[in-house]
Amino acid sequence: MRIAVIGAGIIGVTTAYELAVDGHELTVFERNAHVAGETSFANAGVIAPGYVTPWAAPGMPWKVLRGSFGRHAAVRFGGLDALAHVPWMWRWWRACRPAVYRANRSSMHGLARYSSQRLETLRQTLKLDYERASGYIVLLRGRRERHMAEAAMEMLRQLEVPFDLLDAAQCRLLEPGLNAATPLHSAIGLPRDEVGNCRQFAQLLATEARRLGARFEFGQQVLALQPGKLPVVSALDRNTGSQTQTSAPVRDTAFDAVVVCAGPHANALLAPLGCRLPIIAVHGYSVTAPLQHHDGGAPAAPLGAVMDERYKVAISRVGQRVRVAGSAELGGTTQRFHPAALRTLYKVLDDWFPGAARLSQAQRWKGARPMLPDGPPVLGRSAAEGIWMNLGHGSSGWALSCGSARVLADLIAQREPAIDIGGLSPARLNG
């Protein structure tokens, strides 16, 4: 089949690769000049299947409301823009019911575990080196965090995810760079989890997809889709130097199928087809800087990845750099940085690894995570003929990407996926 993939973030690239493996003729349309240029560019890089859970959870609305007014709030509202998301928040609130949450958690964890296995297979088979490091530690600053972590540990037990409850001394043995002056009560150690450079992985996998015949067309702004037995992609070539449809040629190309992997931009293409999804952009932040070596010795930086449970901020080792990432912002744009969100990132980095990075050379990033109100992504055929969807992975796109791509490729090939995908169907969002 001749298949078009719209979007070359981590979801689009993994989808293109899996479809190319199946022998399809692939064309990937990407509006940027390279792969992983937006949401996949500088995320935390953590792959922790046991911690892939819906944001819509029992008690979460109260936690968000109570915590959003704090100085270092994990969830923020980007001004009046957030009011446009009220319908989404209503659906999110309804999805926080215990029974709905348990079903969505099961779907997400099953996909995350499958995705981790698929990633491991690709890493070993293709010999991919994407600055990977093993291990993930959730830091519990005090008794309050330790008490609140009981629910997370019970969830890990139910899901049969291996973990260790570490005391402060054990934690510092695993991460010797942790600042001794910052109080640490205990930690949850997840030895089978990992951290890696999502963008680098996407670049490597795109190269492998090209070897299988996939064609990546960059600088292509997809303007519209026409469903049918041979769906049509209408794309504007942004490489011409013009950004307007009236002064640049629009090319129409027919395919046997089209897969939309355009993240929060998907509704611009799907809504005219009657396939609007309740998907919004929830923005996340990161700061990445080169490691700072002192007196020729090793930097006091993480060896893998840690997460500060109090502030919901992750600190990751990315090769010879350190990355601190967190925050969830509703409303706003990727161009407007909230100073308080950045201050929280710098604070958490300084608390645990002071002087670890050359912050004068730091790169700030803000990405738009495509999030559905109930949590799981949508994988499968849309209501429009010939149009498929791989969308809505939220903050877990990197952790869910490889499994989602394999599932989507199996569905297009009319094969039974390796996991239960009942909770991932677009039909669940009807009404």
Image (cartoon, rainbow, N blue to C red):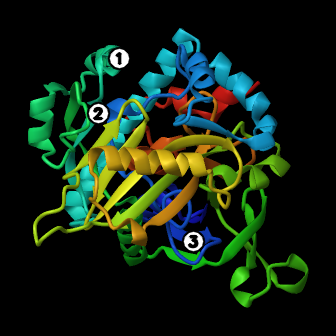
Image location of residue 345, percent across then percent down: 45, 48
Residue 426 visible in the snapshot: yes
- Tell which circle, 1 or 2, labels the residue nearer the N-terminal end: 2
- Tell which circle, 1 or 3, labels the residue nearer the N-terminal end: 3
Helix, strand or loop under label 1? helix
Number of labelled discs? 3
Which numbered dot is residue 144? 1
State the residue in front, 283 or 2: 283
- View extreme (bottom): residue: 240
Image location of residue 276, percent across then percent down: 77, 42
Q: CA distance from mark 1 to mark 2?
A: 14 Å
**Residue hosting label 2:** 138
State the residue in front, 425 or 103: 103
Q: Residues within 10 Å of mark 2 (few under 14, many from 20)?
A: many
Q: CA distance from mark 1 to mark 3?
A: 51 Å
Amino acid type indicated by mark 3: Thr
State the residue in front, 357 or 317: 357
Residue shown at the point (65%, 57%) measured from the top left: 334
Amino acid type indicated by mark 2: Val
59 displayed left or right of 126: right
- View extreme (front): residue: 181
Helix, strand or loop under label 2? strand
State the residue in front, 163 or 382: 163
**Residue hosting label 3:** 27
290 displayed left or right of 9: left
Q: CA distance from mark 2 to mark 3?
A: 40 Å
Residue shown at the point (20%, 44%) measured from the top left: 178
Would you identify the image quadrant in which residue 48 lies?
A: top left
